[in-house]
Image (spheres, rainbow, N blue to C red):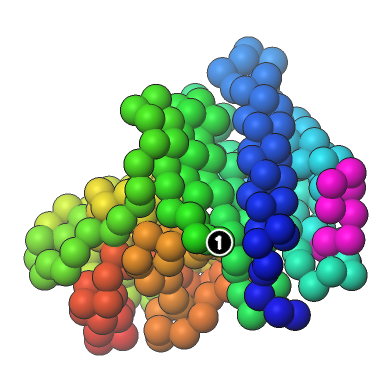
Amino acid sequence: MARIDAATAEDLISTAAELAEAARNATLLHFRTDALAADSKETHRFDPVTVADRLSEERMRAILARRRPQDGILGEEFGAVQGTSGLTWVLDPIDGTRGYLSGTPTWGVLISVRDAEGVVYGLIDQPYIRERFEGGLGRALVTGPSGERVLRCRGPRALSDAILFSTFPEVGTPAEGAAFRNVAARARLVRYGMDCYGYALVAAGQIDLVIEAGLQAYDVQAPIAVIEAAGGIVTDWQGGPCLEGGRVLAAANAEIHAEALRWLNG
């Protein structure tokens, strides 16, 4: 389909904001409550899902059924629905459920919309700390307790001066972990456990790199939109597209991206 016209863009942006508000309210109903419990989606490892994950996605889907019934949906908890418009909403109702269960504040909600060519707009919303990062359709903004400001990634610097984030120290398979450590050993500072907030910090100009593996489409599409709108780059570990997830390298600029790629594949 053709890229988005002005009227459609305005509607997509306002719809995404309504989705984010609904997800924010749904997730905060259960956050840091004594009654919160989790089931595991897998038997060989703890992959938690909570009533808040399901409620958040249910409320977002209800809004889309009312406002954008012609669009498709891909959500983490309730799968895919085909649309007729050529647009698909990609929803992660809580990115960082382990952190959510633990009471940490940096879990988030990921909302994006894509067409046949790629992601056109995305939000990284942080309900508890009330920051919202948005990118695409001419926007690259963060709003929160400190007001509103334009998102802009950091400028070039050597890997030896860079800050690198990843969610898990293991970073996928043993081979993937070894490749990650090849980069991490050369970075100035390495931090773990921020989930989607790490990608937001790339867009905000605070850090240089996020490197992860084993991701899904709903984990990456909103971060791609936000980081690219802020001037950064998001690819797989070979420098190709990563719209469907897998191995992801998010970088603040082309220079640090190229250096990280060399060591990932070295």
Q: Which residues are magenta?
A: 65-72
- Residue under the point 48% across and 28% down: 130
- Residue under the point 64% across and 80% down: 117
**Quarter containing the C terminus:** bottom left
The residue singled out by tag 1 in the image is: 137
Q: Is residue 8 magenta?
A: no
Whether residue 115 is visible, yes or no, is yes
- Left or right? Give the position of 152 relative to 98: left
Q: Nearer the viewer, residue 115 or 199?
A: 115
Residue 178 is drawn in which quadrant?
Answer: bottom left
Secondary-structure class at tag 1: loop
Q: Is residue 71 magenta?
A: yes
Q: Position of residue 213 (x, y in %)?
A: 47, 67
Q: Position of residue 151 (x, y in %)?
A: 35, 51
Neighbor class of circle 1 (other Cα within 10 Å; few <14, some 14-19, many 20+) is some
Q: Is residue 210 above or below residue 91?
A: below
- Residue under the point 65% across and 62% down: 6
Q: Nearer the viewer, residue 71 or 124?
A: 71
